[in-house]
Image: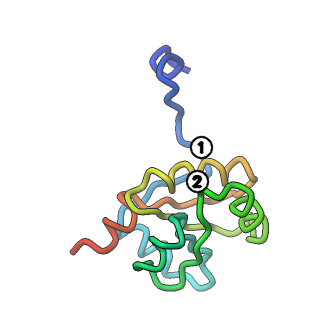
Amino acid sequence: MSIFSFLFGCSQQPKSVTVLDKSEFKSAMSSNNVQLVDVRTAVEYKSGHINNAINIDVFNHSKFIEAFNKLDKNKAVFVYCRSGKRSNKAAKKLDSLGFKTIYDLKGGYLNWIKN
């Protein structure tokens, strides 16, 4: 750990987490039976979301853990939020829960809907 990381609390991305840009995320999701999760609030989710995404709010810790424990930890999980900050935190939590492959959408839903 560098002195900078130690002083400022910056941590490296876990090996199980890969941040993908919009085109990479779309391409990786093209396989069948994807575990796609919107980690925003229910209100944000209802205002628009990626097709076939389920909503698991990262701010609701107990339900977050409970809901993710129902998913397959050996299968890739795709996460996104509004801009990428919450999904990055969620991805790190998923790593600690034992998920092997986690894809995080860079720039979040705002990037997804941008032309």
Q: Quadrant of residue 73?
A: bottom right
Its colouring scheme is rainbow
> From the viewer's perspective, is the residue at label 1 or at label 2 nearer?
2
| View extreme (top): residue | 3
Residue 114: % across, % down: 25, 71
Which amino acid, by three-letter code, is at mark 2?
Answer: Ala
Q: Closer to the camera, 20 or 81? A: 81
* Helix, strand or loop for disc 2: helix
User: Is residue 10 shown above or below 78?
Assistant: above
| View extreme (left): residue | 115
Location of the C terminus by quadrant is bottom left
Residue 110: % across, % down: 32, 66
- The residue lying at 63 percent from left, 83 percent from top is 33
The residue tagged 2 is 91
Label 2 Cα crowd, 10 Å radius (few <14 / some 14-19 / many 20+): many
| For the residues bearing labels 1 and 2, Cβ distance under 8 angstroms | yes
Location of the N terminus by quadrant is top right
Which amino acid, by three-letter code, is at mark 1?
Answer: Pro
